[in-house]
Amino acid sequence: MGATRGSLARPRRLPLLSVLLLPLLGGTQAAIVFIKQPSSQDALQGRRALLRCEVEAPGLVHVYWLLDGAPVQDTERRFTQGSSLSFAAVDRLQDSGTFQCVARDDVTGEEARSANASFNIKWIEAGPVVLKHPASEAEIQPQTQVTLRCHIDGHPRPTYQWFRDGTPLSDGQSNNTVSSKERNLTLRPAGPEHSGLYSCCAHNAFGQACSSQNFTLSIADESFARVVLAPQDVIVARNEEAMFHCQFSAQPPPSLQWLFEDETPITNRSRPPHLRRATVFANGSLLLTQVRPRNAGVYRCIGQGQRGPPVILEATLHLAEIEDMPLFEPRVFTAGSEERVTCLPPKGLPEPSVWWEHAGVRLPTHGRVYQKGHELVLASIAESDAGIYTCHAANLAGQRRQDVNITVATVPTWLKKPQDSQLEEGKPGYLHCLTQATPKPTVVWYRNQMLISEDSRFEVFKNGTLRINNVEVYDGTWYRCVSSTPAGSIEAQARVQVLEKLKFTPPPQPQQCMEFDKEATVPCSATGREKPTIKWERADGSSLPEWVTDNAGTLHFARVTRDDAGNYTCIASNGPQGQIRAHVQLTVAVFITFKVEPERTTVYQGHTALLQCEAQGDPKPLIQWKGKDRILDPTKLGPRMHIFQNGSLVIHDVAPEDSGRYTCIAGNSCNIKHTEAPLYVVDKPVPEESEGPGSPPPYKMIQTIGLSVGAAVAYIIAVLGLMFYCKKRCKAKRLQKQPEGEEPEMECLNGGPLQNGQPSAEIQEEVALTSLGSGPAATNKRHSTSDKMHFPRSSLQPITTLGKSEFGEVFLAKAQGLEEGVAETLVLVKSLQSKDEQQQLDFRRELEMFGKLNHANVVRLLGLCREAEPHYMVLEYVDLGDLKQFLRISKSKDEKLKSQPLSTKQKVALCTQVALGMEHLSNNRFVHKDLAARNCLVSAQRQVKVSALGLSKDVYNSEYYHFRQAWVPLRWMSPEAILEGDFSTKSDVWAFGVLMWEVFTHGEMPHGGQADDEVLADLQAGKARLPQPEGCPSKLYRLMQRCWALSPKDRPSFSEIASTLGDSPVDSKP
């Protein structure tokens, strides 16, 4: 396609002097050279093509193209691509001619032109079949010559093929003459047998095409039956008549016959039963009277001439029908808008016609309210347009109609706005929001900008009035009602002031116990519209003794005596509301302590195990045993187990399944205590039959046994002497207290290290993580736990400091030999460096809680280091650290962190695990008080565990607020917790809602745009609410809002939260 290198075309002649001077200039200007020149080529119509042109020149040249000497303009079909000319689709009309590539140096004016090039365009184009001879169809007669021409053109010249009624024709067949050169088909002579539909096809190197319009040749034979009048389809109504017309002509006259669908002939002499009312007239017409459904079908009119095939004409008789119209929904439109209502015609035969009417008058086809096709159009709607509009549909079968009720909506107007109100606590309260509009307005209420949904406390009447079924103090806030219709809405708000009733907060327990010979207090507090005066009285009217003081409602006993028992009355009174009374029966008791606690016991299989337990107190405590998470009922123990009167448990013929933790529970009417110990059942070793050569001599063995027994006896005597000396265990001689013959025979072995086993806490009152009860029994229990969980400080290898809590430093460490079969365990260590007595007490209470809880989603207490200061609490740790940092990293775009975004399903899974852990904690009557993402740990497998790092001193200092001489997690606290110090499981639920918000915002600070004082003010006003996080499903945000209910009893339990999260079918992308 390209020209040889160095070929040059001179666009103009140079003067002779210039030609002579060119060698003398020493080649100061080089010529333009075509590296590739366009060449002539074959091309296909409508296909792509390319004329190549490449130029080499010393300077910058401009390349363009000429077609027959005229410049080529770029179009979408034909355009310059580089220096070549590209064709998206070759066109035989626009691209025929000579192309030339021109290169011009705009600086020197030098110009060079390539060789000429053109396309050999191959194409084919369809055309009709036309009559060439005779001049018109009217001149065609039998036995005359007929010539047809095929108007299919192309390049190169196509080859043609003729067809009659789709059958190929060949030259010489049935007097046919085919001329491909002339594109003709000649029939000589033409007769009736040549009648038919003629078409042609042609093909060449480009492809194939067939005639776009065919020719029907009809040469009549007078003896053939010809159609004069063909029957038409008829649609009639039931019981009406139907007429089919049918006529043929021929010489001699043809015969005519009618047939019905089942090929039954229809004549006036013999009619089938279902066509008894049919009449065939002499002119061939068929009349059917009183048409019934069985008469519907296809009728055939058959004409037969003397020669030729029969001519069959068909027509169908349809019975008219019309279906019912679908119902219209009432429509509500706003004034001033343009609306349309479409009325689709019902199914029917023939197709029903449709029109609209209003007030009995047919709507016009133009105007402000008019009909357009099947549509009712209302332009610039006015209130007067409201009413009933009727759509009519009708055909031969009848008429159908359907009404649509159109309402023109108006903006609501006030009948009665909500007013600022004073509602009495504990009684129903009403806020009115009365409006009128068309249609009836919809009224919704908001409380502190949160939508009020109807539940057991709130009810919205049909007229818009809001009823608060039982007014609470927390209901004192702003309320807003919104009344709306499609035309618009109005709103108003009112403030509710709750008139507090005079009540005890909380009501004193009617029966309370005080420990004999100890200090005790009995609180009694109350609130009302005015601060009440609170005082205590004895029910018998006697005055309080000197060691009992009444200090603003707190009854303080300096030292409880037996005479202090009795009935007391707390009286709260103020001027406007009078007084209320609460009666309390105080019992003086000696709280339960354990004289003998069960110890870790290891017994051979088949032997007898004795777990001793004795408790003392006043009233005398009853003892129950709990084994392997079930209470052991003395009446159902069976022959192998027995509980002695002193409380000890004996198990005969022990089996491996008896292994586990056993809890001794002592309780009376005042308190309950429990202590536990593990029982291990092992196989008894088989003794050797003979002594080996290395066995010690018998006298050596006797000597060893004698020394051991002597040392043991000396030790026992020393211990007994110490016990008598201290006068604390004078009654601890267990064997002497049992009746003779009751001592079981058993064999004990030394056991291995104690493992953290199943929970056994049976706590009857709800206690906070940092507010567990204390007392002598609790102190003994702590010492017991401390002894059992002791872990040597020397086996801890610190790794890094995580931060500082209220207690002291919190760090990561490696614990050697902590878990069986594991050389090193990564643990979290909390140190007690504070000298504050309250902090030390809280530290001990926290370790008691984690020591009693056992759940997959709560960290375990693994050990204690108390042999020296500072004391250490060794807790379980997981590899990814706290949940707060995990959430922040998952949102980070830093490639070095290799973080992956969390899907909604994964976020729900994180929240569900925290809820399950908190459910376990609350079921055991504990309160966390500092639940947040920073106090939960997460593993690489995304397992979450509730913990209590409490890094309030440095790492998370910004998330704590100094309030009333303490650092508190303000942004996670419920109103009653921060304002009244009332911590409960319900305040933990509030914090859980904030934790959910943290998860869905990837660890953002709650109320991040507000200062601490502003958050506190919002909590006091009952307005502290967090917005819905981006991408958080509405169902889950509604769960958060329930957690933030102002009234604690309106908040869900952790069991309900876990169930709701587990039922959430949320699976979306990050």
Image (cartoon, helix red, strand yellow):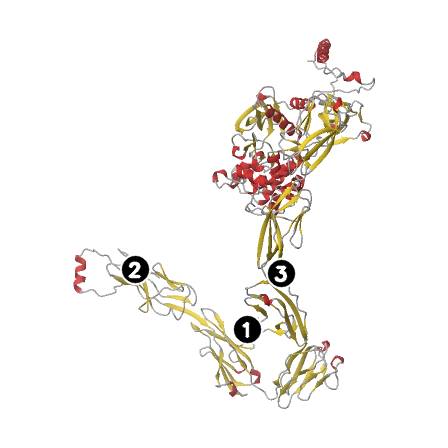
Left or right, 393 with respect to 80, comes to right
Could you give the CA–CA distance between mark 3 and mark 1, rounded to whole angstroms?
Answer: 29 Å
| Percent position of residue 544, x then y | 72, 24
Q: Secondary structure at mark 2?
A: strand
Badge 1 marks a residue whose secondary structure is: loop
Looking at the image, residue 639 lies above or below residue 359: above
- Counting residues from the N terminus, which is met first, the one under dot 2 or under dot 3? 2
In front: label 2 or label 1: 1
Do labels 2 and 3 touch, CB within 8 Å?
no
Query: Where residue 456 sits in the image (x, y, percent)?
Result: 69, 46
The amino acid on which the numbered mark 3 sits, given as a three-letter code, is Pro
Q: Residue furthest front?
A: 575
Position of 508 relative to 1067 (above/below): above
The nearer-to-camera label among 3 and 1 is 3
**Distance in Å between CA atoms under marks 2 and 1:** 64 Å
Question: Which residue is labeled 1 in the image?
Answer: 366
Q: Quadrant of residue 964?
A: top right
- Tag 2 residue: 62
Q: Quadrant of residue 247?
A: bottom right
Q: Position of residue 328 (x, y in %)?
A: 64, 65
Residue under label 3, please give it: 439
Of mark 2 and mark 1, the one earlier in the sequence is 2
Name the residue rendered at 57%, 25% in the picture. 831
Residue kind at label 1, given as amino acid type: His
* 3 or 1: tag closer to the N-terminus: 1
Question: Residue at point 60% right, 55% down?
Answer: 483
Which tag is nearer the camera, tag 2 or tag 3? 3
Where residue 190 appears, as percent x and y from the top left, is: 53, 85
Q: Residues within 10 Å of mark 3 (few under 14, many from 20)?
A: some
